Image (spheres, rainbow, N blue to C red):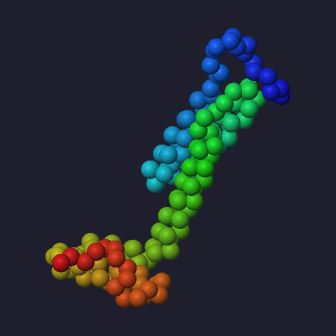
Amino acid sequence: MSQTPTEPRTTGQPPAVDRGGLWALLLSLAGLLLPPYGVVLSVLGIYQGRKARLRAKDEGTSAPWSVASMVLGAVGVLWAAMVLGTSLLIWDENAAWQQCLSQANTVSATEDCNVAFRTSIEERFGLAPGSFPYPAPRG
């Protein structure tokens, strides 16, 4: 693998640019913005960014945004892992809250469900009463 460009360039011609890094950045960004598909899109962004960087290196060109796409993809994978871990950690509390809300027919019953959910989360994680702000109480 030589460092010389594969295409001869004339004087004044701008160097060739690999666009794979831009596509990789878009995939990584979509991974952050579309939570259900976050891990898959972020991993694809990392892969595409790495591939664009290696291809640009082999061809002696540049691949703008390829490093940024790999970093953003890694952030997306970490974010998706945190969201998944948190969801799994409070699965039982969330299921009980959803069950309570499905049976609540009044605003006060809904508020009772919200209070029970906040209380169960605070007890689960050893938080001070009233320190868990979601869902916010009405009033």
Foreground pick, 71 / 31? 71
Q: Residue 139's quadrant in the figure?
A: bottom left
Instruction: Say if 48 sits above or below 2 in the image.
Output: below
Q: Position of residue 32 (x, y in %)?
A: 48, 51
Foreground pick, 76 / 65? 65
- Answer whether residue 43 is visible to the viewer in this image: no
Q: Position of residue 45 (x, y in %)?
A: 58, 43
Residue sticking out furthest to the right: 1
Q: Which residue is rendered at x = 76% and y = 29% of the image?
A: 58
Q: Residue 133's quadrant in the figure?
A: bottom left
**With 32 as the anchor, is 74 left or right in this view?**
right
Q: How many marks do you count on the picture? A: 0
Instruction: Say if 133 sits above or below 80 in the image.
Output: below
Instruction: Say if 91 sits above or below 51 in the image.
Output: below
Q: Which residue is rendered at x = 80% and y = 27% of the image?
A: 3
- Answer whether residue 31 is visible to the viewer in this image: yes
Q: Position of residue 99 (x, y in %)?
A: 32, 74
Q: Position of residue 53 (x, y in %)?
A: 68, 36
Residue sticking out furthest to the left: 106
Q: Which residue is rendered at x = 64% and y = 33% of the image?
A: 63
Q: Which residue is rendered at x = 68% and y = 12% of the image?
A: 11
Foreground pick, 106 / 48? 48
Q: Residue 100's quadrant in the figure?
A: bottom left
Residue sticking out furthest to the front: 12
**With 90 as the anchor, is 99 left or right in this view?**
left
Residue sticking out furthest to the top: 10
Which quadrant would the N terminus be assigned to in this image? Answer: top right
**With 5 as the anchor, is 72 left or right in this view?**
left
